[in-house]
Amino acid sequence: MEVKNNTAELKDNSAYRRLKDKVFFGIVIGVSVITISPIILIIGKLILKGFKQINFSFFTEVTPSTYDAMVAVSNNETIPGGIVNGITGTLLIVGIASLIAIPIGILIGLFLFESGEKAYARLIRNLSDILQGVPSIVLGLIAYLWVVKGITNGYSALAGSVALAIMMLPLIIRSTEETMKMIPGSLKEAGMALGVPYYKVILRVLIPSGFSGLMTGILLAISRILGETAPLMLTALGNPMINWDATAPTSAVPLLIWDFYNDPNMVDLIWSSSLFLMGFVLTLNIISKRFIAKQ
Amino acid sequence: MNTNIDVIENPVLKIDNLHIAYNKSDNYAVKNVNVTVKKNTITAIMGPSGCGKSTLLRAINRMHELYPDIQTKGSIYLNEEDIMKMSSIHLRRKVGMVFQRPNPFPTMSIYDNVIAGYKLNGMRMKKSERDQIVEESLKSVALWDEVKDSLHKKGTFLSGGQQQRLCIARAIAYKPDVILLDEPTSALDPIATSRVEDLLVKLKKDYTIVMVTHNMSQAARISEYSMFMYLGDLVEYGKTKRMFTNPRDNKTEEYLTGKFG
């Protein structure tokens, strides 16, 4: 009886396969370099151009007047002053926006998680998705109508916060719902089986178990709105001084960047402010990545 | 009345005409179950997959109420008290439950897991009282010696078998009347399984234990009474020894001799 020798029939084409492997490896490396190069180039440019303006006074002094900047530029000195009015303004506006959006967003996210596929929950979920697609300038206009015209009778940090809070909401709602879905149902059952009222199971078992997920969503939402400029132009307007009054016009770092762009004497401050904003957002992103890793 | 189902005098649990369906249009997953459970025994619920074992078990602490689609008909009495008339919170404190997969609370330490029932309900206690409950509960599940030096580590660091014993400790910390176990050893290796079995035998002097098991030899080893369920019906119920040596129903015999299931 003839024994068929399987191995002999296979051609030895391992050299060809190794070559193919190398070619594809090269392509993948090339494509990934193209993908990451923008971020490297952006950060590189910002550091190169912005670093020389970053000093102690950058974080402690308000924006210089055009005249001071002009004098400094013509004398080839670094521009005096800083962006502390923008930093404090951003903290104020984003802080209030977070205070509005985080509790509401988490509550709605929990509601959607609980209600699953009920018609009302589906409606809310779809509306929240649509909200995410609303252009930020439109949210700025709405906040202008509601808050600037309706409540504070003038440009205010609160108006900016409302616009940004609306931007944060869909992100937090989604991430809360997704996080809660990831928590195994057995934990809920374990809590309920101990005779614990449901609201306590949510508060003391489910939310702590999903804490890192919730934090990730919140941090990503915050870093998403930190750089928003358009809605703030229509609402917070800007302010050359430090302002902690939510009902008064307030500056913010992205607004300052826009101001600097419009003032030929302050071009250098654009880069340093952008570097600062970028660093801030990047830090938040890294922290939220840490939370994801912990999950 | 089905003569293959023994009736026990002064039962701790009495189930009357229980029907359960997973939603309105579905067939019943548990049909017309009438059964009584004896105090301080281990009662095993056996049967092939999908016969309604877990469904029946989970009705006893009204776990089904977490899923609004599930329809339950009939009544269950715990010490002659209708459980449908009790608050579910009160009921679940009297009827503890251990699940198939160990599910300690991942955010809590071993200590907090044991005391979770008290803690989550916001009961204030002296630290000495809490320490005592934790120590007693962990000792009764034979976990104390293994974890006494790491009580404040997370419960999820324990092995699967230890986690399951921790979950049993969590259930008994509340001193329930009845403990329900839903295939408590199916996720465990043989050594961990035999430790949990030994533990259940020890625990029955203080608690009434009802457990679902897929494993006939486990039922034979540790239970005094057994239920055999098939397609939602309670086919036979009685002393385990008798059921294994002299089953009264053909279906029971076929299942026990491995002809199906």
Image (tube, coloured by chain):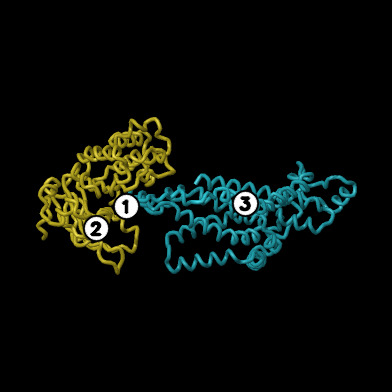
Chain colours: A cyan, B yellow
Report how many numbered discs are placed on residues in the image.
Answer: 3
Disc 3, SS = helix
What residue is disc 1 on?
B89
The answer to whether marks 2 and 1 sit on the same chain is: yes
Amino acid type assigned to the residue bearing label 3 in the image: Val
B79 vs B189, left or right, is left
Report the Cα–Cα distance between label 3 and label 1: 65 Å
Q: Nearer the viewer, mark 2 or mark 1?
A: 2
Residue B211 at what x, y percent from top left? 24, 48
Chain ID, mark 2: B
Report the Cα–Cα distance between label 2 and label 1: 28 Å
Residue A179: which numbered mark, if any?
none
Disc 2, SS = loop
Residue B6 at what x, y percent from top left? 11, 53
Residue A254 at what x, y percent from top left? 71, 55
Residue A67 at what x, y percent from top left? 87, 53
Residue A23: which numbered mark, if any?
3
Q: Is residue B131 above or below residue A96?
A: above
Q: Nearer the viewer, residue A200 or A214?
A: A214
B93 vs B201, left or right, is right
Report the Cα–Cα distance between label 3 and label 2: 57 Å
A47 vs B237, left or right, is right
Amino acid type assigned to the residue bearing label 2 in the image: Cys
What residue is disc 2 on?
B51
Q: Residues within 10 Å of mark 2 (few under 14, many from 20)?
A: many
Q: Nearer the viewer, mark 3 or mark 2?
A: 3
Q: Residues within 10 Å of mark 3 (few under 14, many from 20)?
A: few
Disc 1, SS = helix
Chain ID, mark 3: A
Amino acid type assigned to the residue bearing label 1 in the image: Ile
Residue B27 in view, yes or no: yes
